[in-house]
Every structure is written in structure tokens, then in C-alpha cells.
Amino acid sequence: MIALVDVDLSRPDHALAVLELTSRYARDPMGGGEDLAPEVKAVLVERLRARPDYFGVLALDDAAPVALINCFEGFSTFMARPLVNVHDVYVEPAYRGQGLSRQLLQRVEEVARARGCGKLTLEVLDGNTAAIASYRRFGFETYALDPAFGRAQFWQKLL
């Protein structure tokens, strides 16, 4: 039986699960295909624990962690309300196709609504068709402030 639990990084089993599943996600082709650097692994949980804007949800099969969603609260100036950015969604390959990402997203939506958030945001690779289909079924879509100017894009500049 799969159970969802909110991440509690003060619990060693949750901290280990977040670290391990985030590492597996990083190694997945849709996560970049490379493991987290050792120096990142050494500080990730500690730094997440220090962030009041972080929350996550784990899916456990008995005690074994099989899926994770990492989220951060932000703020929408156009709505004058907080938002939740879904930063990482990872489901172990053997558990894909069973609706776990939908269950994780449902829990995130519950938390966001309880916090008074105006929206959920996320990023997804163009080629990750399974994730795109899942997100669309959940109600996510690309957006445009004015269709004449095109759809929004997510960009980055590494520092």
C-alpha cells in the first residue's frame, strides 16, 4: 500500500529519502542524467532544512520511498499572493503509470490552498511527453499574458 507523507527533514529516514530520490532524479535522463555532485549531497538536506519556503511530499511503499515532490513557496506580484513552485517530481521507474505524480500534486495543491496561494508553477522539458501529459491532466498549461506575444518560457543563467 502506497502512503503519502509530508517531508519532515528532522526525521533521518525522511532526510535520507529526499537525498536518495533527488539523486536518482538527477541521474534520470529527464533530470539531466548526472548524479548530484558530492559537495551538493553533503549539504542538500541541511540547506533545505534551513529554508522556510521548502516543503516536500514522499510516497512510501511500506517504508520504502518510491516518489518525491520538492516544492518552494514564492510570490506572484500580479496576484499579490504566494505561489508554490513544484521544483522536482520523481517517481521510481517501477512505480510510474500508477498515478503517483497526480497524488503528489494533489497533496501539493492542498498545501498551497491552505497557504492562500494563487497558483502552482513548474517547469518541464519539451521531450518529457509523459510528464507533460500528466501535468495537463492535472490542469497545468503553458501560459501567455497576451497571446500576441507568445507563450511564457522558463530560462536560466547559471551563477
Image (cartoon, rainbow, N blue to C red):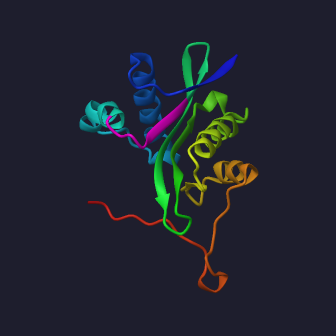
**Which residue in the rendered view is the most extreme toward the top?**
62
At x 64%, y 65%, the residue is 142
Q: How many marks?
A: 0
Please say if 66 is above or below 77: above
127 or 100: nearer the eye? 100
Per the rendered image, the range of residues in magenta is 50-57
Q: Looking at the figure, which quarter contains the N terminus?
A: top right
Please say if 103 is above or below 121: above
Q: In this view, does 26 lie to the left or right of 119?
A: left
**Which residue in the rendered view is the most extreme toward the bottom?**
148
Is 51 included in the stretch rendered in magenta? yes
**Which residue in the rendered view is the most extreme toward the right?**
137
At x 38%, y 40%, the residue is 52
Q: x and y percent of residue 157 in the render?
A: 34, 65
Q: In this view, does 69 lie to the left or right of 137?
A: left
At x 63%, y 69%, the residue is 143
Q: x and y percent of residue 91 in the render?
A: 59, 34
Q: In this view, does 38 lie to the left or right of 13?
A: left
Q: x and y percent of residue 29 in the render?
A: 50, 45
Q: In this view, does 93 lie to the left or right of 70?
A: right
Q: x and y percent of residue 129 in the render?
A: 66, 53
Is 141 included in the stretch rendered in magenta? no
115 or 141: nearer the eye? 115
